[in-house]
Amino acid sequence: MKRGFVRCSRVLAAGLLAMGIALANCHACLAGLPLGVRGVGGGGIVSAFRRHDTDRLSNGSAGIWGEKRLAPLASLLWEVNYTAMGGVLHDKAMYGSEGIYAYDFTLRTLTVNLTMPWRSRLECGSPRRRQEAIVKRGSDMTGNIPTFLVQGKTLPETWENAVLKCWHDGVDIRTEYDKPEDPPSKDCTMVMVVDEPFAEPRIHRAFPGGLEDLEIYRQEVVEGVHDHWICPEEGKWTYTYHKRLFAYEMEGQVIDQINYLIEKLASVGYSRRAQAITWNPKTDPPTYDPPCLQRVWCRMLTDERGDLVLNMNTHWRSRDAYKAAYMNMFALTDLQRVIAERLSQRLGKQVRVGRYVDIADSFHIYGSYFREFAGFLRSVKERTFAERTWHSDFAEPMFEEARRRLADEKK
């Protein structure tokens, strides 16, 4: 019965239109929508109005929303199908430099359900009496934050795919840093797995910042070159990751947690206790910008040849997916390399770097820089992966210049 209804939907819609019957006054310009409805898979699932149309976005205090209006004929057909069969609209949107969204409409055989996981503004009723259903893409409105796993061989591949996953399937959530006019951020819980952290290419060209900045940041985390910038009483930094990991201050003591981690693994390589934390429950909660990195955890395992492999996990409470995550991962995987080298020296045998796992409770793309982020999306679309990345050899001259700058700071 349902399939028969689907097959005749075009005829039914045209007939009702000819008779002048209007259903539910949903108006919008999906002009040119194909009126055929076709089956997809089993279970009576059908796909209708499958079309990728574009519209400019309007930017308002409630966020950035695409405006769509159903043309009378499309409106009629939509109402017939939707009322009889239920439906869901899936937004396959990509935000471009001009603020472009595309839409993918899918109908399903289920009871009428007005909870639709898309990110758009559906306008119903006449201009005098209009109801707006503002619903969010990437969520079924259950209040659950989505969790994603992204795995790749190299660092730039994994980071890029994680950012894209957050953009396409994350939910809209406001942040404590938003201005009133900023759209909500795209957000999710993200688990990234990098199988070979030092495989080339290792550098993504699209991370915000220069190659010299990347090397300086690596040294801040691994070598503590800017630990002396910590001075909260003067409005300066309240912490560095290096200081918290290598010289954590507690009850008048200074604890080298990385040294503990290395000594623990040197004695029991499979220990589950080899970790270092950053959070200070006394000083961090009241600060404006508390540490994002929370914990580093390591464990060793032997491979099929009997060689020791150092696995590392890092856990982050919050992460700017586009502007911070790549540099964080670049530096933390280098810390993994340093720990592996020190373990090799301590044990007198080779310890190689294994997979790196990065867990972020909030992995987000801020609404405040959506237009800037459009350039990243454009580069992914228009350039090959080789054109979006660099090998470490290419970056080495810039890294060396950064080392000279740091040396000059000390003079």
Image: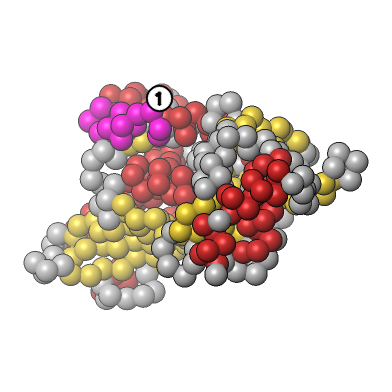
Going 41% across and 29% down the picture, which residue do you hit? 379
Going 47% across and 34% down the picture, which residue do you hit? 377
Q: Residue 15 or 63: which is nearer the viewer?
A: 15
Marks counted in the figure total 1
Q: Which residue is mark 1?
A: 405
Q: Residue furthest right?
A: 128
Q: Amino acid at mark 1?
A: Arg
* Quarter where residue 81 is shown: bottom right
Residue 3, magenta (yes or no): no
Left or right of 19: which side holds 194?
left
Left or right of 268: which side holds 296?
right
Left or right of 353: which side holds 403?
right
Left or right of 180: which side holds 296?
left
Vertical comparison of 277 with 169: above or below: below
Residue 228 visible: no
Image x and y of residue 111, in percent: 65, 69
Going 22% across and 30% down the picture, which residue do you hit? 393
Helix, strand or loop at mark 1: helix
Q: Residues within 10 Å of mark 1 (few under 14, many from 20)?
A: few
Q: Residue 409 or 39: which is nearer the viewer?
A: 39
- Name the quadrant of the C terminus: top left
Q: Residue 68 or 126: which is nearer the viewer?
A: 126
Image x and y of residue 391, in percent: 25, 33
Vertical comparison of 17 with 188: above or below: above
Going 51% across and 64% down the picture, which residue do you hit? 3
Q: Which segment did they paint magenta?
A: 380-395
Image x and y of residue 244, in percent: 50, 55
Residue 388, magenta (yes or no): yes
Image x and y of residue 148, in percent: 46, 59
* Quarter where residue 346 is shown: bottom left
